[in-house]
Image (cartoon, rainbow, N blue to C red):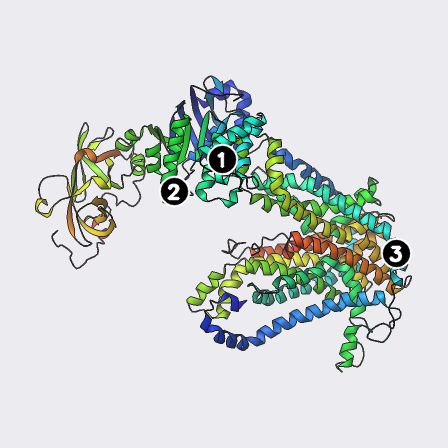
Amino acid sequence: MTEKTEFEQLRLDGVGRRFGGQDALQDLDLTIRAGEFIALLGPSGCGKSTALNCLAGLLPLTAGSIWQDSKRIDTLPPERRGFGMVFQNYALFPHMTVRSNIAFGLQMRRLPKADVTRRTEEAIRLVQLEEHAGKLPGQLSGGQQQRVAIARAVVLEPSLVLMDEPLSNLDAKLRLEMRTEIRRLHQSLGLTTVYVTHDQEEALSMADRLVVLRKGRVQQIGTPEELHTKPTNWHVADFMGFRNLLTVKVQEAGGRQVVVEGPGIRLAATAMAQVSSGERVVAGVRPEDLVVQPAAAANGGGNVIRAMVEVVEYQGRELAVEARTPEGHRLHLRTPERVTAGEAISVSVAPERLLVFPLGDEAPPAGVPVLGDGASSSVGAPVLSRAGGEAP
Amino acid sequence: MTAVNAPTAGGTHAADRRRRIAASPAAWTVWGAVVLFMIFLVGIVGSVLVNSFGTRWFGTWLPQGVTAGWYSQAWTDFALLQVIITTLEVAAAVVVLSVLVGVPASYVLARRNFPGKKVVYLAFLLPIMMPPITYGIPLATVLYKFNLAGNLSGVILANLVPCVPFVILTMTPFIEQIDPAIERAARMSGARTLSIFTRILAPLLVPGILASSILVLVRTVGMFELTFLTAGPDSTTLVVALFNSMNAAGIRAQQSVDAMAVIYMSVMMVLLVVALRFVNPTQLVAQVKEEPEP
Amino acid sequence: MSTEAATQHPGLSVRHRLAERGVDSQLLLLLPAVVFVIGLFVYPFLYGLGLSFQPAKGGGAFADYQRFFSDSFQRDTIWKTLRLSVPAALFNVLASVPIAYRMRGKFRGKRLITTLLVIPITLGTVLTAEGLLNFLGPAGWFNRTLMSIGLVDHPVRLINNYWGVFFSLVITGFPFAFLLILSYISGIDPSLERAAATLGADWRARFQRITLPLLAPGLATTFCLTFVLAFSVFPSAILVGDPTGATRVISIAAYQAAYEQYDYPFASAIAMVMGAVELLVIAVVLLWRSRFYVGSTGGKG
């Protein structure tokens, strides 16, 4: 490399981007250490792609600055930052062969011809495209195009690789393969990577650290485990697979252990932040943490919700079940028990798995009946033949 | 047509044929109209063609004899070689200039949003929407004031007025359909603006530029009003020369004028054949997006 | 933090603000075209507008406009132009709809037909006029045919009057309208009509309830473009029309003022009136168009 741009750390300082009065990204503070794999995670329109493009230099900032060690780089044009990027729809040059696509960046750096050839061939071998090197991008499958795009980005040995939802256009099987491959490349080349995705599973499985964004603001930054077990608010929880979010009221507050109450339910739970008695809160639990109780133990002890099974989906070893409480709360759960639609079940939840988040001034999560809003009227549970029947 | 659109399994063929016959009055009217139009078209082109080769034609279906003499007469009488050279010079200059001015502008319009974009777009649209005479007369007045009219430069400038917007309006959708991520990818690979234009955009734009050039060429050779208003005696193009000779009827033999018309027609036909290799017929008419050719 | 950075680098905060509005050096690519359109279109137009208020023969600023509207020989050119261009444009659009509707699918020879239709557009009005003079003239093939099959005794007069110009407007305008409408109709997703058919709509209902409403904005646009062509009628009005009588259209009036009387202010005034009338008609049509659904028609177009 002629201009090796290795760095110790890359610092984003209050980075923001407005589009005609609309904040697409606000106050992003993030320090990326060399060799790290960072995932920017969030639903569409959360500002994650904006953040990536700002980092790349493709989008000028409207606030803040970006520092590479002690050098300010947000004023540099993208071609002088020395980063590599993999685009969502690959953005391969349609009029160039695979080989010329990969060689393009090296030629732009005016490397000697021999170096260009050698490094291009190396990169082609790295992504196992030797047979296709002479083809045009249009003649390749999606997965192969993806490999070309990755090779084109990493052949420059960039100090930072940016990936913008690179797997979203692939089918499920290929996505899993490429996920492993990207991780393998990251480890073998030691490339610092920023990876944008809306798929929480992808982010959790690949990244060293995750940045969860919502409406242009950072919600939480942490390791996969921190995010998985300790989301800071119910939005992050929602995104991290807490499919069951109930709007309830705090009954007893006392440190971490709290008791919450809603129409027809009263549960012990764990508070993730300071809450006080009588406060409206959101209680969240993952489907896999709801346990269907055997019929005999139906009344045995606390933390039980009664519900009626509405929809059952077969998913191999487990069933995905949608059930509804008499008060109209809809529950998603996973169970190895063979339950059927119309069956009444009892579901228990361990207090440490039921997390309580303050609601604040926000609107409660969508699709959840709000405390006391005519709970009886929303009991639209279908009356099926086995309604009220005991579990077998 | 309907028969193609309807899902025709093998067994329903007979039923289909019956239905087509049943629907025939409307079909006959439609096809009758098309045939009538084609007869007019053939009649118009044919009578010019036949007359230009005829010796004496009066009160009969066809002329009495065949001659090519009118062509040599028209060629010398109307100084057609000079006229054709002028036409080609004007057309070439207009094509080159309108592409040079129009393509960068359409790039910005396709890729960027900026304050006042709508106003700029409207300014480019108006020259196409206005009758050439309405702006042609003030334009010619201004050009004469600056001594730019009455010669080749005036004709070229006047013809640029509808042609630059035309290039912009055809190239903007063409550039829009090139994925902007391709340019970003080039930038991320370290390419400066110049390399992006020469190595990435230019090869991708060639088909579009070729198409809009040929369309501008056809329009310029056929453009009557603006050339007519700004041309001087040595800067008339073929179509204006044709009009002048027709308007001065009686000075030259009608057959001689027709011979010139056939020469003009042949030039246009050559251009048309070339054009249709690059664009589909609808694009010759306006810049409406059409379904891709099968 | 961001405010701190901004106060430290005043140049950067300007940069930030411009970036937010989408302004940077790339916009310079637009400059040649903008200079061009201002220099060769906007400026001459405004110059002409200014000139039209400075009559060569004196009088108030509006003297030339008064002269135009008080002289029936001049004023009637508006009416004569509209009497030619509106019916011609309407005819071209309305005749195109059923034909384009029939031809909307794919069939053999479609490209041949569309190519043949491009010919008269390519040839232009001057050559069409020459052909019409020969073809529709008293001794032309058309009248000979009518007489030989006994439809008429004497040649019908079809040139050097209103009809000659009307025919020339149809010959060049119809293919134009047809090709545009064909592309609009092809842009409507055929599965919409099939969906309507499964819901029990016969072809008449399908056309009226599905195709026509989706086509209406395209029809309005096509009418505007066809009308502009017809309204600009100039060479054929002179060659196959009656340029001193029935087809003395407004462009002839403007041309004569400029190039025969050398009265540029008056010519500019006529050109401005011509532009205003045209824009008025288009505005009315577009207003009507705005009442329709204008969005995706589901096709590939």
Kindly check if marks 3 and 2 are in contact, taking CB atoms under 8 A apart as contact: no
Q: Quadrant of residue B194?
A: top right
Q: Residue at x 56, y 22 (%)?
A: C11
The answer to whether residue B77 is seen in the rendering is yes
* SS at circle 1: strand
Q: Quadrant of residue C170?
A: bottom right
Q: Nearer the viewer, mark 3 or mark 1?
A: 3
The residue sitting at the bottom extreme is C150
Q: Nearer the viewer, mark 3 or mark 2?
A: 2
Taking depth in this image into account, of C90 and B111 the one nearest to the observer is: B111
Q: Residues within 10 Å of mark 3 (few under 14, many from 20)?
A: some
Task: Pinpoint the chain carrying mark 3.
Answer: B
Q: Amino acid at mark 1?
A: Phe
Residue labelled with disc 2 = A174
Task: Pinpoint the chain carrying mark 1.
Answer: A
Q: Residues within 10 Å of mark 1 (few under 14, many from 20)?
A: few
Q: Residue at x 58, y 73 (%)?
A: B27
Q: Is residue C222 above or below residue C200?
A: above
Q: Residue at x 60, y 53 (%)?
A: B288
Whole-percent x, y for residue C63 in the image: 79, 50
Q: Is residue C9 above or below residue B35?
A: above
Q: Amino acid at mark 3?
A: Trp
Q: Is residue C276 above or below residue B58?
A: above
Residue labelled with disc 3 = B75
Q: Amino acid at mark 2?
A: Leu
Q: CA distance from mark 3 to mark 2?
A: 70 Å
Residue labelled with disc 1 = A19
The answer to whether residue C240 is seen in the rendering is no
Whole-percent x, y for residue A326 in the image: 18, 49
Task: Pinpoint the chain carrying mark 2.
Answer: A
Whole-percent x, y for residue B177 in the image: 55, 45
* SS at circle 3: helix
